[in-house]
Amino acid sequence: MTRYRFRYSPKRRRIASAARLVLLLSLPLTAACSVKAVPVIRDAVVSVGSLRVGGSEEVPAAEPSTTRSVRSERADADLLQSSITLSEGYGLADEDDTTVKLISPLDMVSRDAGPKPYPSESEYAEGGDIVRTTYGTYSGTCFFDLASGGQVNNKTELPNETLIAESRCLPNFTVSDTDEPQILIYHTHTTESFEPYVREKYDANFNYRSTDDTKNMVMVGNAIQAELEAAGYSVIHATDIHDYPSYNGSYARSRETILPILEQYPSIKVALDIHRDAISGDGTAAQPYVDVNGKEAAQVMIISGCDDGTLGMPDYMKNFHFACCLQQQLESDYEGLTRPILFDYRHYNQDLTTGSLLIEVGSHCNTLDQAQYSGQLIGQSLSRLLDSIKEPKPQNEKKNK
């Protein structure tokens, strides 16, 4: 399989090559073990004050869910009636764990941290409380459930009944067994970053942006890429920085990056813009997480744009089909990992393919490890979804094998 990577460092290439060699050497042992064991597929918003995620829109109360802070793991909390808005390596898997083994982001050292490196402990200034919370099922007229898990937050004028019918559609593309890249990962807000580890107070001196690609969204994209490649899919990961030194114009710059890639590789079916959210308010900041197989993962939100006739996205419903399929796959694989799909009048360069989505991986007060783990889970679920829509091999090719 050909590996495609934009701005891929020589160091990572050496690491990946070494890991592949170890993997090849381990195949006989793995095969022997597999005879004896069959792998098993792993199977409310609560607020403190007014939580905000980039803008302002009213969200109805959710069903009760677990929420806790480091200071009070089982503290009771009021049900949400707040204003929530939406912000604008290879390794070896254990026999009972299909997750690729990656180095923790805290143990990674960037070859070039850039002009805005990740802050050191000495720079930390204690800020407001970090509220650890798990967002659950929402109620309200703008929310509806998907058949196999997860929800949609319909912020458009389209009736829920129409979208429920559309949510049952398969993606409007298929994939195939090929060395050509079929997935593009990129980052409009590349420098978005996270907390170093679980703690009670956020860093008042840190704006949660860094050009260090071991501590920003590139790290999360790497985790998604690693899982997809381990499943046999070729991926292009564009790691260009689009939001530094200027944040304004980020989407125009990311568009300039991905248009030539899509032109060069018409085989690309899926284009994922990987972000993180920013949920805060009243001197607190949220850390939305869920336990998956004994390890904490940042909760994930998919954004699928709708066109009101002014956004130039005539195929927006095809992206919605893909969003609903991925949402249900994620929830089927890892219950509670997702927040509702945001279906709203947003563009986000989603006119470029019929498999274009923006994915928010956690919020700024999630930890680096939580975000990386969620990236791996996204990669695993996406590979399973793609496997389910893969074109069958031609009969003559099967006979030749």
Image (spheres, grey):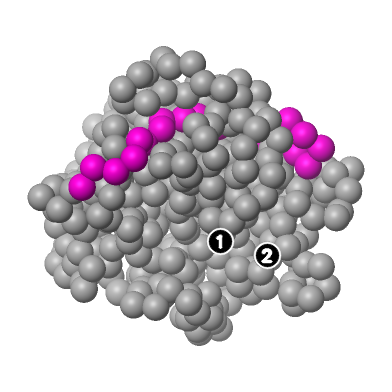
| Residue occupying the far front of the picture | 282
Image height check: is 199 above or below 169?
A: above
Disc 1 or 2, which lies upstream in sequence? 1
Horizontal and vertical percent position of residue 105 = 23, 48
The amino acid at mark 1 is Glu
Horizontal and vertical percent position of residue 295 = 35, 28
- Packing grade of label 1 (10 A; few <14, some 14-19, many >=20) is few
Image height check: is 208 above or below 11?
A: above
Q: Quadrant of the N terminus?
A: bottom left
Left or right? Give the position of 274 relative to 176: left
- Helix, strand or loop under label 1: loop
The amino acid at mark 2 is Arg
| Residue occupying the far left of the picture | 122
Residue 346 got which mark?
2
Whether residue 344 is visible, yes or no, is yes
Residue 37 got which mark?
none
User: Is 160 or 170 nearer to us in this picture?
Assistant: 160
Q: Which residue is located at x 69 percent, y 44 percent?
A: 58
What residue span does the magenta drawing correspond to?
125-150
The residue wearing badge 1 is: 88
Left or right? Give the position of 354 relative to 334: right
Left or right? Give the position of 246 relative to 25: right
Between the C-alphas of marks 1 and 2, the distance is 9 Å
Horizontal and vertical percent position of residue 38 = 43, 23
Q: Which residue is located at x 37 percent, y 18 percent?
A: 73
